[in-house]
Image (cartoon, helix red, strand yellow):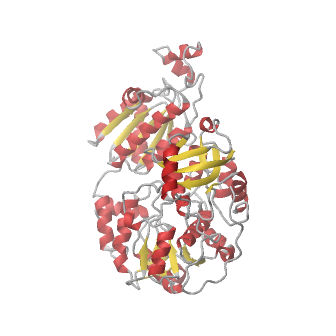
Amino acid sequence: MSHSALAPTPEAAPDDALIAPHGGALKELYLPPAEAEALKQRSTQLPGVDLDTRQLCDLELLLSGAFSPLEGFLGRRDYDRVVEELRLEDGTLWPIPITLDVGEEFAADLVVGDEVALRDSQGVPLAVLEVSDIYWPDRLHEAKQVFGSTDRLHPGVAELLERTRPVALGGRLRGIQRPAHHDFGELRDTPRSLRAWFAEHGWSRIVAFQTRNPMHRAHRELTLRAAQQVGAKLLIQPSVGRTKPGDVDHYTRVRCIRALLPHYPADSVKLSLLPLAMRMGGPREALWHAIIRKNYGASHFIVGRDHAGPGKDSNGRPFYGPFEAQQLLERHQEELGIRIVAFPAMVYAANRDTYLPSTEVAEADEVRDISGTELRRHLHEGSEIPAWFSFPEVVKILRERHPVHQPRGFALFFTGLSGAGKSTIAQAVIAQLLEHTSRPVTVLDGDEVRKHLSRGLGFSREDRAANVTRIGYVASEIVRHGGIAVCAPIAPYADARAESRALVEAHGDFIEIHVATALEVCEARDRKGLYAQARAGKIASFTGISDPYEVPEQPELRIDGHAAEPAALARQVLALLRNKGLLDD
């Protein structure tokens, strides 16, 4: 994929002019209406891809110019240099690979020069990709270079290694129409529309703030001081595409931020939503965020402590240092053009009854804070949230979203070979659950799901993955409403299990239980003779015999279905739930 030549280091713009887009020009990829309509009609005859959430977010930001100077999904040479050097092939600074991943079966029918229709989940055509490159990225190497880790506790790494398909298609895009959004329409700006708003209101010095959380008093203090420090107006631009699993839903986040706006000085703040699929990539992601805000017209960008960090790794250490993001952006400051406002965390000093930067805390100061876990406990118990922490309007919205004593939904996801004892153990767990709680429990058994929810699906890898994804989706809806879902499919493939996990963890807890019963035990238990038929070649693609079972690497619990009676194994599951605070003693 070709790009514009590397632009020189931006010269200082006039005081009343907006910063130029990254690379010098805004790359909007939508066709004129008549051409778009003609392409839409022709797209029905093209091979097509139904995009997932990440791909849909990437496409929207490519088409609108938010990812300028990109003109499509990265080809091999651009991809390689981004991974290794944070640059496109032509030398332009770009830190995150933007690729379109597809399955090998789909890619096998394509050649360079083909066109591919890109559609939303409803099958609506949004764009056509002109394929210029078909390649197989080394995802493990990408994880090491881009995220600095292969630890699957990192959500970006887990996405890359467990849910990203093996083939990448590169090429230019021609946009047909914007993805449909039915929420907060007045807040969904494109780079062009937001730049026009800034120009109309005479804003040229604009400091942007990225967030994936509701905003409280500390956030207000930080953003207000940052804007005053550089003499700029404030753009609050929360990511509302996909964030970290377990985050507060974007509807609640946006309502909370909107409720906060009257607490800023008049004509000083603009709220606009960014449909970004975050990778939680720390320093590289911070650089990416700055480039995107530059394309939207911001002249300055706030970078806080551990910007876009995903927390701690499996050894309990932070994935990134607290100031790595600030240091990376400072190294590229002149080339970036957008100015970086590195700001420390704001903390509350009770003895002064004020917020101050953490760097200004004195030894005598009595610093107070409320962690995310503590806030959730206050909401769950209905206990008082101190006035110094948040605003009444924000707390009211959070209490509506998290009613007092509402139980947290969770899914128990049993996986293992046929005959491992998944359904039997699951039934024992359900019986013991109902001895202790009156909460609704819904069973999604593999055979029953096949009979009702997945009728018509076969046993190809794609159909098996689709069956597990359907189970994950139904479980996620149960969990979203505070219920308990008990799932017991074979679920042989790691990527399909990971997709179910992601669906559920958007709303609650996903507890993967690997029933690791030995194959010979499963065969000895087989009353239907399925294993014998598989060994005789009468059943094709039978898990454990002629088709692989990909053993879970880090399940929440691993049990041997032959080691004890089902009731004893069920007690291990309930003990785990108590330890996680999901079940009362």
The answer to which image quadrant residue 576 occupies is top left
Q: Is residue 152 visible?
A: no
Looking at the image, how many numbered discs can be counted on the residues? 0
Q: Is residue 490 left or right of residue 249?
A: right
Please name the residue shown 38% across and 67% down the image: 186
Quadrant the N terminus occupies: bottom right
Q: Nearer the viewer, residue 47 or 74?
A: 47
Find residue 494 and report its image quarter: top right
Where is residue 215 drawn, in percent x and y? Answer: 41, 70
Compared to residue 52, the image places residue 434 above or below, namely: above
Considering depth in this image, is 2 or 363 the residue closer to the camera? 2
What residue sits 54% from the left and 42% below the top? 48
Camera-side residue: 367 or 196?
Answer: 196
Report whether 536 appears left or right of 353: right
Residue occupying image coordinates x 43% and y 40% = 472
Q: Is residue 413 visible?
A: yes
Left or right, 403 with respect to 148, comes to left
Compared with 120, 355 (above or below) is: below
Please, which residue is most extreme toward the left here?
438
Q: Position of residue 187 (x, y in %)?
A: 40, 67
Q: Position of residue 461 (x, y in %)?
A: 55, 31
Taking the spot 48% from the left edge, 45% from the top edge, the residue there is 41
Residue 11: x and y in percent read 67, 81
